[in-house]
Image (cartoon, rainbow, N blue to C red):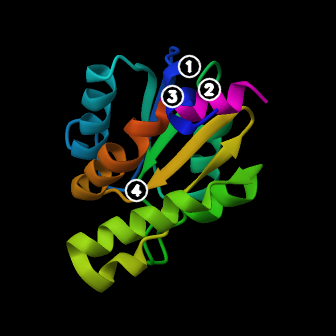
Amino acid sequence: MGVHDHKKQAMLPVRCKIVTVSDTRTYETDTSGRWIREQLEQSNIVVAAYEIVKDDVFAIRQAVQSVEQVDVILMNGGTGFTKRDVTIEAIQPLLEKEMVGFGELFRFLSYEQIGSAAMLSRALAGSMNGMIIFCMPGSTNAVRLAMEKLILPEIRHLVWELRRQ
């Protein structure tokens, strides 16, 4: 069975949690989190939860480990190269399987838009406790790129693959 056949079978309900990692954003100023929510709702994907957490390893881990009945966690922020960017350090050790193609493709597509600065992104995805987790940069342009080109086209297929194991 090919990937197109899999996608046809994968038309199942999906529940997501959005986590914005930021020391400065609020629910009123979180344009990236709001944009993710709007896109999910337009795609008939349930937003089961949404929260903003500080750039702190323990806060980030608590946000993803205290989740119930969610298929996908969509994180934005904290994936850069500064000392405060700790999303990858918080999430990578928790992953059962890493989806290396997500980071590779994200940086490739990002390079086409912003050039060599794309190498500073540490975008990451993988599976954890029966869920798929995506870690994207926090800028709205980066979120838009990841969601439109990579996540939304595959989200149901990925959940279907994870469930059939």
Q: Is residue 9 magenta?
A: no
* Crowd class of label 3 (few under 14; some 14 to 19; many from 20; radius 10 Å): some
Q: Which residue is mark 3?
A: 7
Q: CA distance from mark 3 to mark 1?
A: 5 Å
Q: Nearer the viewer, mark 1 or mark 2?
A: 1
Asked if marks 2 and 3 touch (Cβ < 8 Å), the reply is no
Q: Which residue is mark 1?
A: 9
Q: Secondary structure at mark 2?
A: helix
Q: Residue shown at 71%/41% (left/top)?
A: 128
The vertical placement of 45 against 154, above or below, is above
The quarter of the picture where the C terminus appears is top right
Instruction: Tell me the magenta residue range.
Output: 156-165
Q: Is residue 137 left or right of residue 124?
A: left
* Crowd class of label 4 (few under 14; some 14 to 19; many from 20; radius 10 Å): many
Residue 95: tell me if it is visible: no
Q: Quadrant of residue 32?
A: top left
Asked if marks 1 and 4 touch (Cβ < 8 Å), the reply is no
Q: CA distance from mark 1 to mark 2?
A: 8 Å
- Between 8 and 131, the one lying in front of the other is 8
The vertical placement of 76 against 11, above or below, is below
Asked if marks 1 and 2 touch (Cβ < 8 Å), the reply is yes
Q: Secondary structure at mark 3?
A: helix
Mark earlier in primary sequence (2, 4): 4
Report the amino acid beneath label 1.
Gln
Q: Which residue is mark 4?
A: 77
Q: Residue shown at 38%/71% (left/top)?
A: 108
Horizontal and vertical percent for residue 3?
A: 55, 37
Q: Which mark is residue 160?
A: 2
Mark earlier in primary sequence (1, 2): 1
